[in-house]
Image: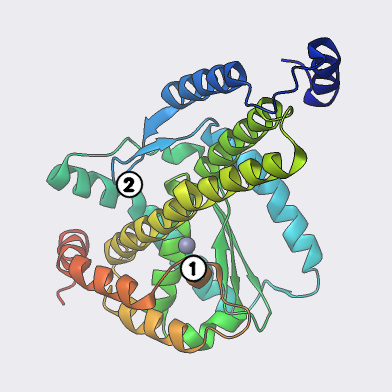
Amino acid sequence: MTPYGSNSNESRMMAGTRRSGGMRWWVLILAAGYLGYYYLSNRQEASFTGRKQLVETTVEQDVALGLQAYRDILSGERGNIVTEGETPEMVRDIAQRLVAAGPKVEALLKQSNGVGADTPWDQFEWAVSVIESDQANAFCLPGGKMAVYTGILPVAQNQDALAAVMGHEIAHAILRHGAERMAHQKLTQIGTVAAGVATSDMDPQRQQMVMAAIGAGAKFGYMLPFSREHESEADYVGLMLAAGACFDPNESIGLWERMGATGGQRPPEFMSTHPSGETRIQNLQSWMADAEKVRAALCEQTF
Ligand SMILES: [Zn+2]
């Protein structure tokens, strides 16, 4: 494919009077063919849920990318990282329990619903840091590097609720949501470049309209719906992980209620991408009986 700047001038000169301002359909057809090929050759099954997802990279690549981002974030927070004391001990303990429960919960759910690819557990490299901050936030990067900001502790109020937050974040990593988002961004980029070439003979205003429509289509057609899907999937798997690690899954309800109340001017990631806290709580309630079953099956104590 020719870079579209020079190509458009060239063809204008060659075509002379034929500056129709139309669409170059062959470019779109080629691009659609390539996108279709990309889609079909990179589609795989998500673990836990069995949802078909578009992922091009491996977990090892997730780990490498995540580690790079993690180092950048931590070096920006130098001086705020808490390594000793009760809080980091508690946070490390929760993370360890959630990760250890992962394979057991996965096997148990697979027994009952029979779906989902096998998570390559040994490829993840888990670690967690505690960052002193007013932010009520936590994250788990692709590949398994986590952080908990101390601002979330007063919102969580107890270990079970903190386990719900961390389970949710860990679920994003296990389900490869970051890698999926990268694949979607690549599709959008290819589509945008192709559309740019295809419309390069149009007058600039029309071209702008077409490009804006494509951008909006990508955003509302799949970027936003997928980010909601990711949130809901992470809620489900996170709840099961917390229950399987013998935390009280019911505490997740109060947590998300308190999250809704403290949204503030810097909403954490899990609030900003989700349409409604009520939907989230309804979903959690509908999964609670299953979560209790997971807890009963994997935990010795009776509840
Ligand atoms: Zn999330």
Mark linked to residue 193: none
List x then y, in percent, for residue 122: 46, 38
In the depicted structure, whether residue 31 falls above or below residue 166: above
Mark 1 to mark 2 CA distance (whole Å) = 24 Å
Picture quadrant where residue 292 is located: bottom left
User: What residue is shown with label 1?
Assistant: 270
203 displayed left or right of 172? right
Which residue: 19% across, 60% down? 294
* Proximity of marks 1 and 2: CB atoms separated by less than 8 Å: no
Mark linked to residue 103: 2
List x then y, in percent, for residue 160: 36, 77
Picture quadrant where residue 130 is located: bottom right
List x then y, in percent, for residue 170: 46, 57
Amino acid type, mark 2: Pro
Q: Which residue is nearer to you in this view: 263 or 109?
A: 263
Q: Which residue is nearer to you in this view: 303 or 288?
A: 288
Q: Nearer the viewer, mark 1 or mark 2?
A: 1
Check disc 2 and report its element: helix, strand or loop.
Answer: helix
List x then y, in percent, for residue 279: 31, 72
Label 1 near ligand 1 (CB < 8 Å): yes
Q: Quadrant of the C terminus?
A: bottom left
77 displayed left or right of 214? right
